[in-house]
Image (tube, rainbow, N blue to C red):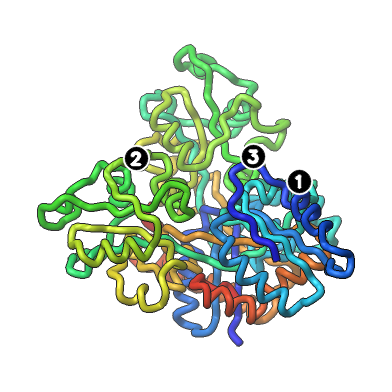
Amino acid sequence: MGVAIHIRGSTTMQAMAGLVAQTYMADQPGHLVSVNGGGTMRGFEGVLNGTAHLGMVSGPISESLEKTRLRLGASLALFAIDYDAMIVAVHPSNPIKAFNFKQLAAIFSGRMRNWKELGGADAQIKCLIGAPSDGLTSAFGQVILKEEIGFTARADVLALPERIRSLARDPFAIGFVSQDARTNAIKPLSIEGVAATEESIRRREYPLLLSLSLVSNGSPPPSLRNFIDYYVRQVKIQKLSADKRVLPT
Amino acid sequence: MKVAAVASTLVIAGASGVSSLSKLPYWRRKKIQLLIAGSGTMLQLNTALVRAYEQQYGDTDVVLEAGGSTVGLIALKSGAIDVAAVSKEIVEVENDTFVRDYLIAKDGVVFAAHQSRELHSLTRTQIKALLSGEITNWKQLGGADGMIRLLSRKRGSAVRRFIELEVVKDLELGTEFEEFNSANEMIQALASDPLAIAYFAMNELDQNQQKSLHIVSIDQIAPTNSSLLSGRYPYTQSLYHVMTLDSAPSAHNFIHFVISPLGQRIITQQNFIAVY
């Protein structure tokens, strides 16, 4: 009887997971790996409620799911796979080129509301964020809004593709996207003096890195452990090869 | 087992199920009741699963209704039903009711061209342009000059709904297509017209048809068991049976049955992709 592994969670990790799954099934006939999205919190929830063997997570567990975890007495094992980056972007016409963490905190918490406070036009800052289930949003909040109550209530909650479209259209919008998904239609900002480039990310100099991990409920059994090791190896192989891991959108 | 047709209005399965059961004399009422409702796409599959389940568990009476995935989830969370059949990803995470969504099968929507056409793959962008009416001629897709005859399904069909929600998405479906009632009708029309292109849900095609039709890859990815399971094939649909932590033992039993080898065999027999 073959092994069946159900993985779900972060959409940032979905493409890579799909590649690994397909390669694994070709290498191991009779084994089956199913990959689904739904966002990082679906990943955590899936392993907590027993509907997934592995979660793909690109951000920290939410407060409410952490409460659930404690209530269940479950322990989660995290396996670091790769990292992406949180790119802060604005419309190409925006004269702003760089921010530090303090400024990002002021903007995304809503304390700073008008571009003129930053030397720009007299216009409301439109913050774009993802849903609570989104790992990228959770991770960004964890780093930037440490001292704040949370994201501003004035923010627009949009899925990643919609955020990118809005940033390309709205001269007063600001949002964060994954390096994987970014396009030339939006302008990335330097953060803490470091430009958001392939190289600065590869060298881990860029300060807003996004950790991509697999999570299991408790210590994984041998068959699952084998798969996780396979996954880690495959990611290294993919990164070394000339083809980028980003699949067509 | 009672099967109701797809409801056009909000139907809470529990209410109608209980009232029809209470008309039976008491000695004919089974001991255990199981209420399943939700996705119309999954109705045929669920019918086959429920039939096999009732044979195995003779003491369970199952009421199966449609109404849609969203309606099913609402009914589940309000406690009106035991299992919701859901054919979309549940993205919202609600922790007051801890839902357990078990993946039970996968399916895909595929595009097929005439046997004679030299067409290996289309991009998602091309498919969207084709369906929205932006692309109307085969020469826009690298072929010889000829008007594309797009074969579509009548409004209300599950596969057409998937096309509108997941394939065309933010665009509007175009108006230049012929509507058919069934996959078989489309296969016949496709076979006789080199200018035609049609879409099908994979579960509508038996093994022979899947082999003999000229199914096109999307973004260079062919629809196979592996590409659907991994999610690499873009038009993959995931099917779930959902219960809550408070669900009755019969709900646990039913889902356990569905993910067992016997349940998964039925899923394969119905031409869906097994996930265990």
Residue carrying label 3: A141
Identify the element where label 1 is drawn: helix
Q: Where on the picture, by quarter, is residue A138?
A: top right
Q: Are marks 2 and 3 in contact (CB under 8 Å)?
A: no
Residue at point 60% right, 29% down? A108
Crowding near pointer 3: few (<14 within 10 Å), some, many (20+)?
many
Amino acid on which disc 2 is placed: Asn
- Asked if the residue under mark 3 is in contact with the one under mark 1, i.e. CB atoms within 8 Å, the reply is no
Q: In the rendered image of this protein, does residue A166 appear above or below residue A16?
A: above
Tell me which residue sits at (55%, 28%) in the image. Answer: A127
* B44 vs A108, nearest the viewer: B44
Would you identify the image quadrant in which residue A10 lies?
bottom right
Which residue is the extreme one toward the top? A122
In the image shown, does B157 or B174 lie closer to the viewer? B157
Label 3 is found on which chain of the structure?
Answer: A
Please name the residue shown 77% across and 67% down the image.
B61
A235 left or right, relative to B142? right
Q: Which chain letter matches label 1?
A: A
- Mark closer to the observer (2, 1): 1
**x and y percentages locating residue B245 in the rendered image:** 80, 58
Quadrant for residue A47, please give it.
bottom right
| Spot occupied by residue B30 in the image (x, y as percentages of width and height) | 83, 69
Earlier-in-chain disc, 2 versus 1: 1
**SS at badge 3:** helix
Amino acid identity at mark 3: Gly
Give how far apart the Cα atoms at labels 1 and 3 are: 12 Å
Which disc, if any, is residue A63? 1
Extreme residue toward the left, this view:
B145
